[in-house]
């Protein structure tokens, strides 16, 4: 009888996860290719089979974060869970609630990615940086569109500034990780974000 085959590990995904953790802990310039290889149990040069270097690794990490958030935002605002007896702005409020929960879940699950995103964008090559910025703008505009339905008299620039401020709050998870369990931190972040957006009224 032939022994069952061991599933092949997704080495590329392992490398990305390890690099994100190391970049978050030590900073981009404090991590070598050899460090990343050691973290996944291969030699440093073996990393080059998957990535051309550290900049390529960092670019893919940040592009992946930005793409995932943009896709998530577009999906959440398309069909939010609406109360059975909706009010006039129920869809917009449900969409905002979905965006908040989605971002909070991401931030609580990925504090290392949030830290890398905050600190290391300047170390990404210009072409990749432009793509990341474009994805980020698209994600922000999902929020601005929803907020404009809730606060139609508020100028877009103010809505955009408020969105970035809320991101700052929600993306604080690298600094609060371990203080509270996720099940306690999530409603705290949600309540604070809702309260901060109320000033737009």
Image (cartoon, grey):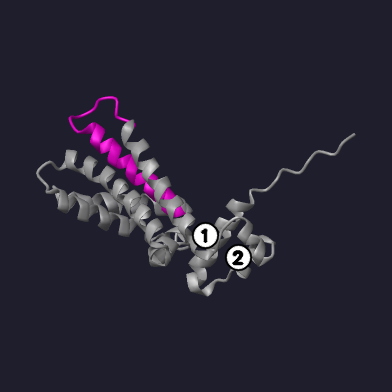
**In this rendering, would 129 be left or right of 51?**
left
Is residue 136 one of those drawn in magenta? no
The answer to whether 83 is drawn above or below residue 196 in the figure is above
The residue lying furthest to the top in this view is 84
Q: Secondary structure at mark 1?
A: helix
**In this rendering, would 32 be left or right of 115?**
right
Tag on residue 8?
none
Q: Please, what is the dominant secondary structure of the magenta stretch?
A: helix
Q: Which numbered disc flags the more N-terminal residue, 1 or 2?
A: 2
Identify which residue is drawn at 37% across, 54% down. Answer: 132
Tag on residue 36?
2
The answer to whether residue 173 of the structure is visible from this angle is yes
Q: Nearer the viewer, residue 56 or 166?
A: 56
The residue carrying pointer 1 sits among few (fewer than 14), some (14 to 19) or many (20 or more) residues within 10 Å by Cα, namely many
| Residue 59 image offset from top left, x and y in percent | 46, 58
Identify which residue is drawn at 32% across, 51% down. Answer: 134
The residue lying furthest to the bottom in this view is 30
* Magenta-drawn segment: 81-108
The residue lying furthest to the left in this view is 153
Q: Which residue is mark 1?
A: 57
Whether pointer 1 and pointer 2 mark residues with C-beta atoms closer than 8 Å, the reply is: yes
Tell me the CA gap for discs 1 and 2: 10 Å
Q: Nearer the viewer, residue 155 or 57?
A: 57
Q: Nearer the viewer, residue 43 or 145?
A: 43
The answer to whether residue 27 of the structure is visible from this angle is no
**In this rendering, would 75 be left or right of 13?**
left
Identify which residue is drawn at 15% across, 48% down. Answer: 156
| Residue 172 image offset from top left, x and y in percent | 37, 61
Look at the image and tell me in which quarter the N terminus lies: top right
| Residue 66 image offset from top left, x and y in percent | 40, 51
**In this rendering, would 201 be left or right of 108?**
left
Identify which residue is drawn at 41% across, 62% down. Answer: 125
């Amino acid at each position: 009888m032939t022994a069952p085959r061991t599933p092949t590990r997704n080495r590329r995904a392992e490398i990305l996860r390890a690099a994100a953790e190391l970049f978050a802990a030590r900073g981009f310039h404090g991590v070598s290719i050899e460090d990343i290889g050691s973290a996944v149990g291969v030699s440093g040069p073996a990393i080059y089979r998957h990535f051309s270097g550290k900049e390529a690794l960092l670019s893919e990490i940040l592009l992946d974060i930005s793409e995932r958030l943009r896709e998530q935002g577009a999906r959440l605002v398309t069909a939010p869970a609406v109360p059975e007896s909706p009010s006039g702005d129920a869809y917009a409020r449900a969409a905002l609630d979905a965006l908040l929960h989605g971002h909070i879940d991401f931030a609580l699950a990925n504090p290392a990615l949030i830290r890398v995103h905050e600190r290391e964008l300047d170390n990404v090559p210009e072409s990749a940086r432009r793509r990341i910025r474009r994805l980020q703008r698209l994600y922000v505009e999902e929020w601005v569109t929803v907020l404009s339905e809730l606060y139609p008299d508020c100028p877009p620039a103010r809505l955009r500034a408020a969105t970035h401020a809320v991101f700052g709050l929600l993306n604080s998870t690298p600094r609060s990780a371990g203080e509270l369990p996720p099940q306690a931190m999530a409603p705290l972040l949600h309540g604070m974000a809702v309260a901060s957006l109320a000033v737009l009224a």
